[in-house]
Image (cartoon, rainbow, N blue to C red):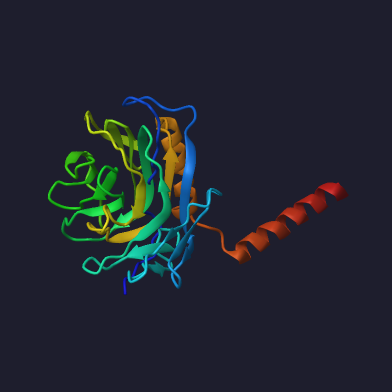
Amino acid sequence: MMRHKKNSGGWLAVLVVAVGALTLGTASASATLLVDYKAVNYNATNGVWTDSSGNGNNATVPGGVTAPTLTANATPNGSAAVSFVTANAGEYLDIATGLAAGNGYTVLAFAEPTENSYLDDNLVGGPSGALAYRIGPTGGINHQLLGNDGTTLGSSITGVPTTAFSMIGVATDNAGNATFYFNGSADGTISANNPFTAPINLIGARESPATGFFIGNVAELQIYSGVLTASKVQTVNQAFINSYVNQVPEPAALAMLAVGGLAIVGRRRMA
């Protein structure tokens, strides 16, 4: 069982995937949220991760596969995270309908890779021809984008810490040209020519049958159709900071604030 220490600070990782007929550095005006997987909406009993976007793209643990666990008090402000802990047997989820291949993708997540050595840890992926996005915490291999033949197209500049949550992400067009993001800022680019032709359908693994299992904790994972602008990525990053890093007021504190507010209103009325 994995244990996590609650702390007052931490890094943020947001994973967003976007699709559109775009070139590197170009954003889509029609970029839309395809999936939003929040740890609070994951059911560790039946292995269903409910899509919060309203599109119904739920992810489910296949039969015979060990379901990831749900770890409480995992993020800097004590929120929960879905924990992928089994490398050999493999823990992953299948998006039944798949996220149809288009002309590109973008990826942003609030995540904490925890593996000590690089083993091909794919956060999202699919069969041959699909985009695969993986996290390699050591050996100078950071977060990487894989081409449709499984080869590495490129990697980020900054290493991903294995003891804290970070915002990790990538936005790529259909040819594999991409920009990496780390904690809301651009973190390296790729100029490739490797089109993605198959839909993304796996969370926590790369191909079918699934291999390259992600090891670590994910508080939230988003996937978009369309390449997001840099400012939109920063907006998503801040939203994750607000949700998982900034301190959440205790119920008692909220009650005291409410009472104080009523008292102030009362004094104003009397005046």
Measured as percent of width and height from the top left, residue 235 is found at 47, 38
Q: Quarter-wise, where is residue 3 in the image?
A: bottom left
Question: Farthest residue toward the right?
Answer: 270
| Above-or-below relation of 152 to 85 | above
Question: Which residue sits at x=30%, y=49%?
Answer: 126
Q: Quarter-wise, where is residue 93 in the image?
A: bottom left
Q: Would residue 36 be found to the left or right of residue 69 on screen?
A: right
Can residue 116 be seen by looking at this rendering? Answer: yes
Most foreground residue, 244 or 38:
38
Question: Which residue sits at x=43%, y=67%?
Answer: 47
Measured as percent of width and height from the top left, residue 125 is found at 30, 49
Q: Would residue 215 be found to the left or right of residue 184 on screen?
A: left
Most foreground residue, 261 or 48:
48
| Above-or-below relation of 74 to 16 | below
Measured as percent of width and height from the top left, residue 162 is found at 25, 57
In the picture, the quarter occupied by the N terminus is bottom left
Measured as percent of width and height from the top left, residue 159 is found at 22, 46
Question: Which residue sits at x=44%, y=53%?
Answer: 245
Most foreground residue, 62 or 250:
62
| Above-or-below relation of 89 to 157 | below
Can residue 79 be seen by looking at this rendering? Answer: no
Q: Count the labels in the image.
A: 0
Question: Farthest residue toward the left?
Answer: 139
